[in-house]
Image (cartoon, helix red, strand yellow):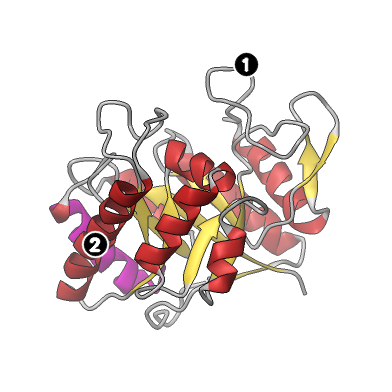
Amino acid sequence: MPVVDLNADLAEGEALTARDLAVLDVVTSASVACGFHAGNRRTMRAAAAACRERGVALGAHVAYRDRHGFGRRDLDVPAGRLAEDVLEQWAALAAEAAAVGAPVTYVKAHGALYHRLATDPEAADAFVAALAPHVGLVVGPPAGALHLPARAAGLRVVAEGFPDRAYEDDGGLTPRDRPGAVVADGAEVARRARSLVLRGGVPSVHGRWTDVVVDTLCIHGDAPGAPGAARAVRLALEEAGVEVRPFAPGPERPAGRP
């Protein structure tokens, strides 16, 4: 039986929202904003508690210090400073999560930093060196500069796909400022999710087949239709015989939860 995780990026407001909670009711892992691009300590703690209550694996969603640009702007942050920044973010979430009895089991970069780690070996080395003592799992693209240092440090890179984003022919994500970059229709997001898991790819934004082999699928929690998209994706996968479960250990799942 095929197996995949369903994760969401969330807790990006000044407080945990009803939309965040609706997404958490469906997903198996949650990447929580750690204050640099969005979120705050109160939101981190609330999200960690909600993950614990639902048996959802909790991860740190680390980014450039860029609240104005939501972490999506390319910033020339030196590798040494980058290492300090990602460690500070992980420690903030770990402290808030510990206060409510929730472990932080993985780390995932956000936005422009996510893309930099795929192409900049020096940044990828710094990222891994900072976080390897604290986590065993990092989420990232299926290929790129992050993989080599992570494997050398004994970390597993969990390959991620985005059913709600368009892909270029080379397997990279279509930049958000281009037409068709974001897929908003829940039914189409579900179809793309099933294709990523069962066929190992999707058609690119130009209509060419693009291989994208994944261990986890991401739903962007800031999208207005995120809860509906998450439900549609999970239902489509389970109807296709795919087991949806977390790639990382999390709290014991409460009885009666999927």
Q: Is residue 77 visible?
A: yes
Q: Residue at x 47, y 36 (%)?
A: 225
Residue 198 shown in magenta: no
Q: Quadrant of residue 6?
A: bottom right
Residue 54 shown in magenta: yes
Residue placed under numbered mark 2 in the picture: 93
Q: Is residue 248 left or right of residue 11?
A: right
Q: Nearer the viewer, residue 234 or 38?
A: 38
Residue 69, percent from left and from top: 32, 27
Q: Residue at x 78, y 32 (%)?
A: 169
Q: Which quadrant would the N terminus be assigned to in this image?
A: bottom right
Which residues lie in the magenta part? Answer: 42-57
Query: What amino acid does circle 2 point to?
Result: Leu
Disc 1/disc 2 C-alpha distance (Å): 35 Å
Q: In the picture shown, does residue 132 fall above or below 165?
A: below
Q: Residue at x 43, y 42 (%)?
A: 113
What element does badge 1 sit on? Answer: loop
Q: Residue at x 78, y 47 (%)?
A: 201
Residue 46, percent from left and from top: 20, 59
Residue placed under numbered mark 1 in the picture: 179
Q: Earlier in the sequence, mark 1 or mark 2?
A: 2
Magenta segment, principal secondary structure?
helix
